[in-house]
Structures are given as structure tokens and as C-alpha cells.
Amino acid sequence: MSLVRDIITIVAVSAGAFFFLAGTVGLLRFPDTLTRLHALTKADNLGLGLVIVGLLPQAASLRDGLKLVGVWLLGLLAGATVSQLIARTARQGETAK
Amino acid sequence: MSVATVFEIMLAAVVLGLGIWTIAVRETYSATVGFVAYGLLLALIWVRLGAVDVALTEAAIGGGLGGVLLLGAAARLRDADQMVAETPGKVTRASAAALSMLTAAALAGAVLLLPNSASTLAPTVIAHTWATGLTNPVTNVLMAFRAMDTLLEKVVLLLAIVGVWSLAPDNTWGGHQGPRHRADPDGILVFLARLLPPLGIVVGIYLLWTGANHPGGAFQGGAVLASMWLLAIMAGLTDTPPVSSRRLRLILVVGPGLFLVVGLGGLWLGAAFLAYPPALAKPLIVGIEIAMIVTIAATLGLLLAGVPERSAKR
């Protein structure tokens, strides 16, 4: 049973790390603010989500698991809000030019 | 070498690199962002060292509220950045470098000269946990064994807020701090400022309550409450109270005031200043912390809100 759990953890956390890597490469390589934000949200949403999914089988109790899910939801909320605010500021900056 | 050690070495290297980058980078804004990331990574180091209380404070103050303060300063300095085109002279730069190197050498020497077995009071603190009924040793040190330091620290916070107030020009003295923020009422910022505070208030109070037996406490909880308040202010949902408000001033002194009263009570009834009667130690400490979290949240929020710049009458 614990082998299955460990396999789930390794697969999901590795997939999450891949999305973080892809998001970071996108942040460094993409040409403008909006596409860079697009790359970042992949790291925030999928990367963090997959890392949390991978850690859930290792959680000692239901409470710890719920806390992990709570971290992901708060991360999603913060990421989505900040991306919107940055994108809006970037567009206003463009029209001002 | 275990995986954890490799992770710790990488973390330390990244923090050091980020620290050097923050100092070396030219733009104020980049330096601020570097500093915030530095604070968050430093919190991870504190977690690895088992100092979760310190990690919480570092994340809340170094990464969170300090970051907001520095971002505001960077925005104000943006125009000044272009103005300061002239670089300091050779003598100034050379003496600054010499002074920095001297300080670094003194610090390095002090670290190298430390005795191998550091003298520690930690076992004594753990052995006297029974005296207060709280099981978090950090809270015991802060609120009982070294309560005097904490009391003075809160007075310093009060002095800091008086310092911010005294920067106000004469015509706005007693007015509202900071600009009146306006945001699109259907926008995402207002949505967040309505959605997040109920959650943040629960987390802040939880941090205070759990601080008796687990990492947490009035300062960390107060920092969370302050950030929720600032979010509502920045979304334009509420305004900073006028500095002349009597209720505000009462809130700002209630924490240290109650602490002082309890301390004097110890002098009158018990053994010494700030000595709690053992039977009442826990209720007294929790009571002081509840008064303190209100004061800390208000003080941290107002420290970040800025100088009074609108007169109270409008």
C-alpha cells in the first residue's frame, strides 16, 4: 500500500516540478507581459496543484490533507487575482503609450 | 549526504546569492522584489532550523508587510531615481567599502570565536514550562520569562506610529493617513478584499490562540489581521481612521497599557514587576495577548498606511 502511495507522490510531484520548470522557462523567454503571465499561471495552478496532489497520500491525517488543499486554493486565489491586476495595469500602460 | 542536506545547501546558496543580487542590482524596484523573495526563502531556512515561530514572523514581516512598505517607498523614489544621476565620489565609495568589510570581518571573527558548546538557557526554559501552563517555549519566554523585553518592544511600536504621525504637515495633522484608495467596485481587487478577510481574520485569531501551545502568537496573528485591514483599505472598502480619533488612540495603547497594569499588579501583589501569580498565569498571559493582537494589528496597519495627508474635516 505504501509503495502505491510513494509512486503516486513521485509521479505527481515530478509532474508538478515539470510545470514549474516550464512556467519559469516561459517567464524568461516569452516576449510580452501577457504571455509571460500566461506562462506563470501554469506554474501556479497546475504545478502547485500537482505537488499538493502528490503530497496528499503522505499526509498524516485528514486535517493535514485539508490544510494542503487549503494552501492550494489560497495560492490559486492569490495567483489569479495578481495576474488580473498585473494584466490590467499592463494594458492601461499600453493604451497610454 | 542525505536529500535534506542537499536541499539545505541549495537553499542557503540561493539565499546568499539573492542577498548579494538585492544589494548589487541598480533599480530600487528590482531590489525590493529581491528582498521580498529573500524574506520568504529565509522563512524556509527558519523552518529547517526548527524555529517555526521565527519563520512565521519572518514570512509575515520580512516577506509580507515589509515588502509592501518597501514597494511603496520604491514607487515614491521612482522619480528620484532619475534625479540622482551623480554617483558618490571615490573617497565616499572607498570608505563605505572599507566600513562594510570591517563589519563583515568583525562578524565573521565573532562567529569563529564562538565556544563549541554554546551556553544555552533552552533546557532551563523547557524545565520551567509548568510555571505558566503554556507549552510553547517561545511564548513562555516572550510573555513570562522575558516579559520586560516584550513590553518595551510594544512601546517601541507605539513610538514608531507617533513618528509616522509627526511627519504630517500642519494642515493635515489629526487627519486620515495615506491616500483615499479607489478601485473598480466590480473589479477583482474589491472581490478579493470581500472574499479574503473573513478567512484571514479566522487565521489571525487561530494563530493567537494556538500560540499558547504551538508556534504562533499575538505578533504573527496581528500581522495577518493587519494585512486583511490593509487589503480592505487598498480596495477602497474602508478608510484609515483620522489620527485625532479617540477610539483609535485607545486601541493603540490598550495592549501595552494592559501589559503595564498587570506588571504593576505583580509588583503590588506578588514578588516583582511582571511576576504573575502562578494560578492566574495562563489567563493573564492570554488576556494580555488578546489586548495586544488588537494593538499590533492597528499599529502595523497604520505604519504601512503612510503619513497623514488628508485633513479629518472632509
Image (cartoon, coloured by chain):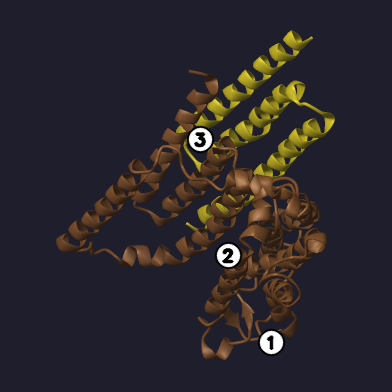
Chain colours: A yellow, B brown
B126 w.r.t. A62: above or below: below
Q: Tell me where residue B75 appears, x and y as whole percent.
A: 48, 63
B180 w.r.t. B131: above or below: below
The residue identified by callout 3 is: A27
Q: CA distance from mark 2 to mark 3?
A: 46 Å
Q: Tell me where residue B35 appears, x and y as whole percent.
A: 47, 50
Label 1 packing within 10 angstroms: few (<14), some (14-19), many (20+): few
Type of amino acid under label 1 = Arg
The residue drawn where x is 43% and y is 50% is B30
Q: Going by the image, does A88 lie left or right of B239?
A: left
Label 2 packing within 10 angstroms: few (<14), some (14-19), many (20+): some
Chain containing the residue with disc 3: A
Q: Going by the image, does A32 lie left or right of A76?
A: left
Q: Say the numbered circle drawn on residue B149.
A: 2
Q: Is residue B207 visible?
A: no
Type of amino acid under label 3 = Leu
